[in-house]
Image: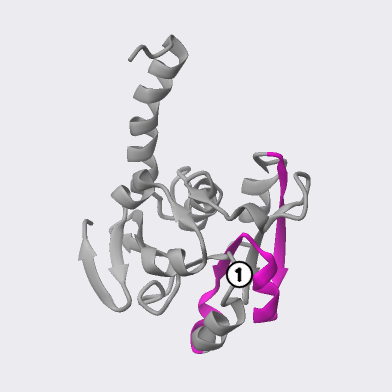
Amino acid sequence: MHIAPARQVAALTLPICLLWFGAYSYADSSSDSPSEYQVKAAFLFNFAKFVEWPADTFASPQAPFAVCVLGEDPFGSLLDAALAGKTMATHPVALRRIKERAEARHCQIVFVSASEVRNYAELMEAVRGSSALLVGDTDGFAALGGMIEFTLEGNHVRFLINPDAAQRAGLMLSSKLLMLARIVHDGAVAGKS
């Protein structure tokens, strides 16, 4: 099979980008390198590029792609800066800070703050039947039904994925994304680091 030159470049560039995406370092406060939450903000947007939402997710081709923060916002203005002017396919990206778990049903990506740790069961019930990609950074988030959990290893941001939770939400995760994650199935860890 013949691959056009532009596709050859893309085919070579994608694995390099994915390696960078898989474990990005953040710096301590004394450096000009990105902070932990700058890296996590970039990941949130990039996760969307490796997830397929059900066809009926959007009311129209121009409906916003909602990235939401549920609970206390650890990003401050970093997430606003990371998402400013971005689009996902034909959808303008809209950042929303939400307080009610039921509002998460209307988001494509929901970052679940550590302040919500006591409410995970209620959150999972509130989003049942929706196609919200739940992302968090508290220990055990993915094993408790979240789809993506950020973890820190040294000064590297990595992530765990619960593909069962994603499947229940009707989300198709790219094999390229799964390859970079440690896989979690309902409380048991398996797969790669």
Q: Is residue 193 left or right of residue 40?
A: left
How did the renderer colour the structure?
A: one colour
Q: Is residue 7 above or below residue 152?
A: above
As helix, strand or loop, the secondary structure at mark 1 comes to loop
Q: Residues within 10 Å of mark 1 (few under 14, many from 20)?
A: some
Residue corresponding to mark 1: 130
Residue at the spot x=43%, y=76% of the render?
145
Q: What residue type is disc 1 on?
A: Ser
Relative depth, front residue between 93 and 63: 63
Q: Is residue 64 above or below residue 134?
A: above
Q: Is residue 46 visible?
A: yes
Residue 95 is situated, as x and y percent measured from the top left of the image, at: 70, 57
Residue 60 inside the magenta-drawn segment: no
Range drawn in magenta: 90-118
Residue at the spot x=70%, y=74% of the render?
103
Residue 104 is situated, as x and y percent measured from the top left of the image, at: 65, 72
Residue 182 is situated, as x and y percent measured from the top left of the image, at: 28, 59
Q: Is residue 162 visible?
A: no
Residue 25 is situated, as x and y percent measured from the top left of the image, at: 36, 48
Relative depth, front residue between 51 and 71: 51
Tell me which corner region of the image, top left, top right, bottom left or bottom right, holds residue 4: top left
Q: Is residue 190 above or below residue 10?
A: below
How many labels sit on residues? Answer: 1
- The image quadrant where one finds the C terminus is bottom left
- The image quadrant where one finds the N terminus is top left
Residue at the spot x=42%, y=74% of the render?
138
Residue at the spot x=62%, y=75% of the render?
72
Relative depth, front residue between 187 and 86: 187
Q: Is residue 140 left or right of residue 121?
A: left
Residue 100 inside the magenta-drawn segment: yes
